Amino acid sequence: MRLAGGVAVVTGAGSGIGRALAMRIARERAAGIVVADLDGGSARAVAASIGPTALAVQCDVTSEEDLRALLARAETELGPVDAFFANAGVAIGADEQTPEAVWDRAFAVNVRSHVTAARLLIPRWLDRGRGCFVVTASAAGLLTQIGIAPYAVTKHAAVAFAEWLSVTYGDRGIQVACLCPMGVDTPMLRGDSGGDVMDHAAAESVRRAGEVLTPEEVADAAIAGIEGGSFLILPHAEVIEFFRRKASDYDRWLAGMRRLRTAVEPPEPRR
């Protein structure tokens, strides 16, 4: 799908990959871009840097009411939405002892918000005969993530939902893509966002796995993949080889991941 002349929505667009996606879509000469973020000030700043084709919307993606209002405003001010980038995400929690409220938030942002957006958009796109739904998952959704169980689990679920959408609607004019980068130079990885950040072991495992890309490099890969009709978009080319190793010998792959976990986790304090 080409984005030129269309209307796109990007959630979590106030910073990081979302901001880079919004800026990159603008370069594709989209007719309109909805810059959506929980932080309204960040959304407005990004929209202002894009110009008159951008519309800033403060939006909590876990709220169906907010998503309905976002789509209504987009259609009123810009036109029907052609592409939706479900990019907002959180990296929170730790292990199986993580409180239920944290697990709930991880599922709400990383998975259920995608389901809600698709529920609202798919009927409209089926009527029009076209649409594009892009999920920002993670290589963690294909492999795993050391140190953050809620992130690993919900990103797997995000990939699974994107797969299901593609199988179900891919031959009815609806394109689905799943963006799965590894390390990206964002506030979440650097730990300077003032909000959700990866813990030391998680961040270190990401850095050891491969090159840390800029958000702009990830956005370039995303647009190229969408225009090429790809479902799985891997800005880090080595992820497909990791995925193959996992599938070909699961036990060996798990043993290797245990060794990596041991290498990146801080030692237990002496008692």
Image: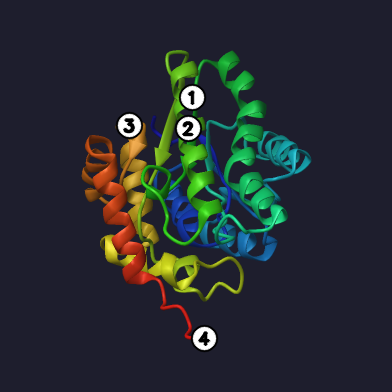
> Disc 1 residue type?
Trp
- Nearest the viewer among 39 and 54 is 39
Is residue 141 visible to us here?
A: yes
* Label 4 environment density (alpha carbons within 10 Å; few <14, some 14–19, many ≥20): few
The circle drawn on residue 164 is 1
Q: Identify the residue shown where x is 26% and y is 55%.
A: 256
Q: Quadrant of residue 7?
A: top right
Distance (Cα) linking label 2 and label 1: 6 Å
Distance (Cα) linking label 4 and label 1: 49 Å
Position of residue 201 measured from the top left corner of the image (x, y, whole percent):
42, 69
Which structural element holds mark 1? helix
> Disc 4 residue type?
Arg
| Foreground label between 1 and 3 | 1
State which tag comes first along the sequence, 1 or 3. Answer: 1
Instruction: Provide the residue designation for mark 3.
Output: 230
Instruction: Provide the residue designation for mark 4.
Output: 271
Left or right: 72, with 170 as reference point: right
Distance (Cα) linking label 1 and label 3: 15 Å
Position of residue 143 measured from the top left corner of the image (x, y, whole percent):
36, 46
State which tag comes first along the sequence, 2 or 4. Answer: 2
Distance (Cα) linking label 2 and label 4: 43 Å
How many tags in the picture?
A: 4
Q: Are marks 2 and 1 in contact (CB under 8 Å)?
A: yes
> Disc 2 residue type?
Ala
Which structural element holds mark 4? loop
